Amino acid sequence: MTDDTKVVTIAGRRPPNAGKGRKLGVPNKISGSMKEMILGALEQAGGQAWLAKQANENPVAFMGLLGKLIPADIALSAQVETIPPPEVPYATIEEIREELRRKDW
């Protein structure tokens, strides 16, 4: 911790809740009020119909917005079938060279 970011107290101790941050699940107050303002502006602009129009007229911006809304962690599951590698007719590099010589490569 650098000197300019230290929490200074009278007795040289930190306050009891210093550095703990918000508890899990408590939303950021600024983010919540901004979300309300954005949703209000969206409603005034025409709501879902306006968003559909923007998707057609400004697809890059619309996809950027969509990318912000889709969760970054998407759980995927898949079954993978392993296929054995094909049989190699050559056992050594010399056999490969001989075959290439025979084919005039």
Image (spheres, grey):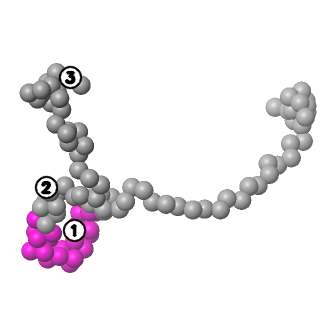
Query: Left or right: 73 with respect to 66?
Result: right
Q: Amino acid at mark 2?
A: Ile
Which residue is located at x 22 percent, y 58 percent? 27
Which residue is located at x 79 percent, y 48 percent? 85
Position of 40 relative to 101 (above/below): below
How far apart marks 1 and 2 lie (CA) works out to 26 Å
Q: Amino acid at mark 3?
A: Thr
In the image, residue 59 lies at what x, y percent?
28, 63
Question: Which region is colored magenta?
Answer: 37-62
Q: Report the residue marked by disc 3.
A: 2
Q: Report the residue marked by disc 1.
A: 54
Which residue is located at x 13 percent, y 60 percent? 34
In the image, residue 99 lies at what x, y percent?
89, 34
Comes first in the chain, label 3 or label 2 = 3
Mark 1 burial class by Cα count in 10 Å: few <14, some 14-19, many 20+: some
Q: Nearer the viewer, residue 74 or 100?
A: 74
Mark 2 burial class by Cα count in 10 Å: few <14, some 14-19, many 20+: few
Query: Left or right: 80 with respect to 31?
Result: right
Position of 49 relative to 84 (above/below): below
Question: Does dot 3 land on a helix, a strand or a loop?
Answer: loop
Comes first in the chain, label 3 or label 1 = 3
Q: Are circles 1 and 2 on residues that touch, CB within 8 Å? A: no
Which secondary structure class fits the magenta region best? helix
Q: Report the residue marked by disc 2.
A: 30
Q: Nearer the viewer, residue 14 or 40?
A: 14
Which residue is located at x 76 percent, y 55 percent? 83
Q: Residue furthest front?
A: 11
Does any portion of residue 15 appear in the rendered image?
yes
